[in-house]
Image: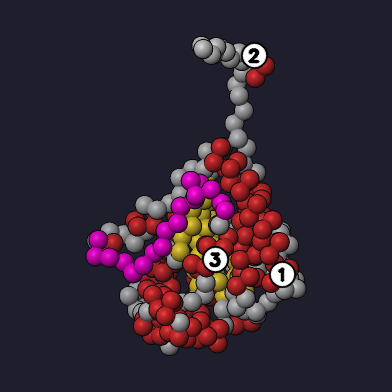
């Protein structure tokens, strides 16, 4: 287990107890200045491991990012994946389902955006919106939710069996920190584009969201696709922890580029003579 991750993993079958987890936990980092070199080292390590993953071309990683509104999903992606080869990454942001989405099963739009072998895929929100948010706003009832939980467990098991390592993070912020960030979106004109009136509506259902996230994470944190609750009141802690998690995941996967099937010393290159 990597340095910053101790205690963050949701043990399969155990309730994450979000209310008891400190959203401002520094995870042993002393300050933002302490976190900067740690994040830089993690990004550097991830660059090398991503290169090996792409060269191997047999497996992939899927990072699923969930959290309350303003928990920092966009910022996390910018900070952690800055400098990583964009040819080896794909990012997809899931919005409210369209009429075409509703015309198919709810996992179809997710399946269409899965990373290719050799790539790292990032989901900004994901199929978990079709469990948690759908339950909070009563699009589905308890019975339908339990069926979807079963679908998702099987879906993620299939991905794991086929070579896609699924890593899921919940960006855990306090209600006070969310309010602070939402106010910033209103107060600063350059952030107006981020503000959605629906964020305030969802905020009123904070306790319901927390309740159903706990229920769903307990049921879907598995050995093959674990959940991690990332303290995210401090953005620099959030970034360092998720980068650490990705490096730990890739290091454990230990991707290996293919080797030449012939002896390199036996290869002869024909010299091209320059003609003046």
Q: Position of residue 22 (x, y in %)?
A: 65, 80
- Is 122 in front, or is 1? 122
Of tags 2 and 1, the one toward the viewer is: 1
Q: Is disc 2 surrounded by few (<14), some (14 to 19) or many (20+) residues within 10 Å?
A: few
Q: Are marks 2 and 3 in contact (CB under 8 Å)?
A: no
Q: Quadrant of residue 97?
A: bottom left
Q: Position of residue 5 (x, y in %)?
A: 68, 65
Q: How is the image coloured?
A: secondary structure
Q: Is disc 1 surrounded by few (<14), some (14 to 19) or many (20+) residues within 10 Å?
A: few
Q: Are marks 3 and 1 in contact (CB under 8 Å)?
A: no
Image point (28%, 62%), residue name:
101
Image point (41%, 63%), residue name:
93
Query: In the rendered structure, which disc, 3 or 1, sits on the residue that comes first in sequence?
Result: 1
- Residue 182: mark: none
Q: Quadrant of the N terminus?
A: bottom right
- State left or right for residue 190 relative to residue 100: right
| Residue 240 makes an appearance in the image | yes
Q: Which residue, given by chain and number where applicable, does mark 1 sit on?
A: 33
Q: Are marks 2 and 1 in contact (CB under 8 Å)?
A: no
Q: Which residues are magenta?
A: 83-100
Image point (52%, 68%), residue name:
75
Query: In the rendered structure, which disc, 2 or 3, sits on the residue that comes first in sequence?
Result: 3
Distance in Å between CA atoms under marks 3 and 1: 17 Å
């Amino acid at each position: 287990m990597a340095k910053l991750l101790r205690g963050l993993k949701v043990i399969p079958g155990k309730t994450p107890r979000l209310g008891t987890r400190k959203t401002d936990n520094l995870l042993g980092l002393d300050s933002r200045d302490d976190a900067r070199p740690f994040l830089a080292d993690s990004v550097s390590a991830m660059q090398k491991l991503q290169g090996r993953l792409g060269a191997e071309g047999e497996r992939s990683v899927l990072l699923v990012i969930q959290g309350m509104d303003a928990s920092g999903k966009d910022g996390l992606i910018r900070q952690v994946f800055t400098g990583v080869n964009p040819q080896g990454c794909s990012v997809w942001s899931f919005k409210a389902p369209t009429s075409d989405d509703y015309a198919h099963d709810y996992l179809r739009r997710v399946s269409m955006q899965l990373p290719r072998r050799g790539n790292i895929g990032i989901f900004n929100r994901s199929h978990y919106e079709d469990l948690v948010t759908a339950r909070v706003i009563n699009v589905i009832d308890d019975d339908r939710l339990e069926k979807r939980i079963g679908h998702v467990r099987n879906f993620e098991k299939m991905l794991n069996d086929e070579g896609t390592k699924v890593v899921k993070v919940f960006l855990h912020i306090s209600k006070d920190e969310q309010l602070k960030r939402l106010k910033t979106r209103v107060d600063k004109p350059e952030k107006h584009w981020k503000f959605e009136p629906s964020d305030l509506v969802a905020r009123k259902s904070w306790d319901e969201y927390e309740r159903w996230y706990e229920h769903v994470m307990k049921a879907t944190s598995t050995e093959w696709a674990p959940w991690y609750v990332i303290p995210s009141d401090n953005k620099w802690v959030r970034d360092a922890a998720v980068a650490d998690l990705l490096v730990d995941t890739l290091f454990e996967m230990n991707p290996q580029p293919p080797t030449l099937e012939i002896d390199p010393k036996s290869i002869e290159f024909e010299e091209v003579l320059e003609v003046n």
